[in-house]
Amino acid sequence: MPVLQTLPCGIHFHRLTTRLSTHRPMPPSCKSLLWRAEPCDLCGAHECRVVGLRDRRGKPLTNVVCTRCGLVSHLDIPSKQQLCEYYKRRYRREYHGEARPSSRRVLRAWRRGKTVFRQLRPFVRTGDRVFEIGGGLGCTVKAFELHGFDASGIEPGEDFQAFSRNQLGVRLENVTLDEVVPDPSYDFILLVHVIEHLPQPVKALRRIGSMLRPGGRLYIECPNIAARYVRPSGMFHFAHIYNFAPHTMAMLANSAGFRVAERLAADGDRNVQMILTPDRHVALEVDPEGCRTTLAALERYHVLRYHLRAGYLAGRLLAIATHASDRIMSDRRVNRIIQRCQEARLPAETLARAA
Ligand SMILES: [Zn+2]
């Protein structure tokens, strides 16, 4: 009988020993290779190699690398139905440990929204219609709105979307990407730390491409599994179905009919950050070194190296100081943000200075 494990989201899956028997066995010389039933979403190959058996909380979770293109993903991709329920009601509570966002989370999201806006400002044109997919608390959408852009978005999580709409007055709908009419309506779309959560990233990017007006751009950002320093025990997470690196993200973009217009982060940075533009002339060309590049990055990980990396202690001290300050001041600062967001008649520049 198969041994079933239950993940925090309630999804059952077979332990690796059981999964091995459900996939076509590989020759004895390739014991760590698997032949999975569902092909790689990026390149269509079936052969993969196991790169992880535990998630960041020590629970069983099998991650593999595609031996053809180097894309890292769960061995078992959850169905859309399972994910829809998970993100609608459970993700924020289980991942962030809260339903209604705490003041500290709102404050962090507000600062993050301002940072994203500042970084992307050179790539957005006056009059652009801006749309964010997976907007969370809506702080990034609000940052664009406060600077005069026609900005809106969607967020599948009911609790965060309700806070965003009711408290911050953000035009954020509680729907999924599949529910958005794929008309060319937007000039600039943001996909910030979302693509790694989607079960079919190529299909999702193609849908987003159909939502862009001629000349439109997509900003995509996600964790970089090839970053110089990733906490080894924190590499894999149930919610991150895919783990991208710059080379696999570039291939994904090409596969979905986009070309990489700008790279806003270096290959070893914490996040992959790219501006993509639709281009019907591009096609997927699988990097023959893709798997080797991914495996080389994964093999660099070392616990000591992570904790001894340059700037680690300084960064930790700064984070502790910021958290302590937020703990004391966050309620007041968030109340000020909410109050100012609701004062719709205030000049945009005044609102933008909130917090
Ligand atoms: Zn692949």
Image (spheres, helix red, strand yellow):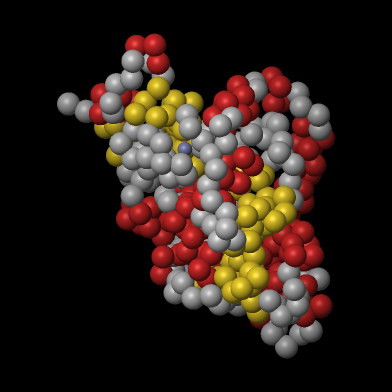
* Residue with the most extreme top position: 29
Task: Name the quarter where the N terminus is drawn.
Answer: top left
Please provide percent x and percent y for residue 125. Answer: 75, 73
Q: How many marks?
A: 0
Please provide percent x and percent y for residue 264. Answer: 74, 51
Displayed quadrant of residue 2: top left
The residue under the point 76% across, 85% down is 346
* Residue with the most extreme front position: 281
Q: Is residue 23 above or below residue 105?
A: above
Q: Is residue 52 or residue 165 the one in the foreground?
A: 52
Q: Is residue 165 or residue 251 the one in the foreground?
A: 251
The residue under the point 55% across, 77% down is 185
Q: Is residue 255 above or below residue 159?
A: above
Task: Name the quarter where the C terminus is drawn.
Answer: bottom right
The residue under the point 65% across, 79% down is 150
Please provide percent x and percent y for residue 21. Answer: 26, 24
Displayed quadrant of residue 281: bottom right
* Residue with the most extreme bottom position: 345
Q: Is residue 187 visible?
A: yes
Displayed quadrant of residue 63: top left
Query: Along the horizontal axis of the image, is 81 left or right of 222?
Result: left
Please provide percent x and percent y for residue 64. Answer: 45, 31
Q: Is residue 163 above or below residue 148?
A: above
Q: Is residue 162 visible?
A: no
The residue under the point 69% across, 19% down is 304
Q: Is residue 46 or residue 65 the one in the foreground?
A: 46
